[in-house]
């Protein structure tokens, strides 16, 4: 199992640069959606692809959730995130408010589960919206 060690200066260089480069990138299934965005962020600051089992294997909502079902037996973004996290030794926080910058999170956005990462300020979650990143 690969170790998720963050690069030196991961937050001020790798993560910050990643966020700036994708600030206005629109939602695209399979490359820049709410599952691939946090995986790509983690890849940027660790060099480890936690979503390798999902990468380049879906291109719309139906194929995304069919793949979630096939790989995890589940039906939600949370199932995909838990699968990727467990495969790479990431442990869910007992207390969600203890999540810190760069952590993978799944949040309820008006009844829809979306994955994202904790922002550099440690106070917000960032994910992908139709026209770019949202917090």
Image: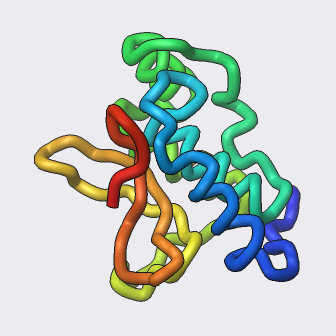
Say which quarter of the image contains residue 108: bottom left
Q: Nearer the viewer, residue 101 or 134?
A: 134
Q: Nearer the viewer, residue 10 or 39?
A: 10
Outermost left residue: 110
Say which quarter of the image contains residue 61: top left
Lateral position of residue 130 relative to residue 2, left or right: left
Q: Nearer the viewer, residue 73 or 65?
A: 65
Q: Provide residue 54's location: percent of width, then percent of height.
A: 64, 29
Q: Provide residue 73's location: percent of width, then percent of height.
A: 47, 30
Q: Provide residue 113's location: percent of width, then percent of height.
A: 28, 45
Name the quarter where the N terminus is drawn. Answer: bottom right
72 vs 97: above or below: above
78 vs 131: above or below: below
Residue under the point 57% across and 39% down: 36
Residue under the point 50% across and 37% down: 25
10 vs 49: above or below: below
Q: Nearer the viewer, residue 40 or 50?
A: 40
Q: How is the image coloured?
A: rainbow
Name the quarter where the C terminus is drawn. Answer: bottom left
Q: Provide residue 98's location: percent of width, then percent of height.
A: 42, 87
Say which quarter of the image contains residue 95: bottom left
Residue under the point 56% across and 51% down: 38
Residue under the point 20% across and 51% down: 109
Lateral position of residue 86 relative to residue 107, left or right: right
Q: How many marks?
A: 0
């Amino acid at each position: 199992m690969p170790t998720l060690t963050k690069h030196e200066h991961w937050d001020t260089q790798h993560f910050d640069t990643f966020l700036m480069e994708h600030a206005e990138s629109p939602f695209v299934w399979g490359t820049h959606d709410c599952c691939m965005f946090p995986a790509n962020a983690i890849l940027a600051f660790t060099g480890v692809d936690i979503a390798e089992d999902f990468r380049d294997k879906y291109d719309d909502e139906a194929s995304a959730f069919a793949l979630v079902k096939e790989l995890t037996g589940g039906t939600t973004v949370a199932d995909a995130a838990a699968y990727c996290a467990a495969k790479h030794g990431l442990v869910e926080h007992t207390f969600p408010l203890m999540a810190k910058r760069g952590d993978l999170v799944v949040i309820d956005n008006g009844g829809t589960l979306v994955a994202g990462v904790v922002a550099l300020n440690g106070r917000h979650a960032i994910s992908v919206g139709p026209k770019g990143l949202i917090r």
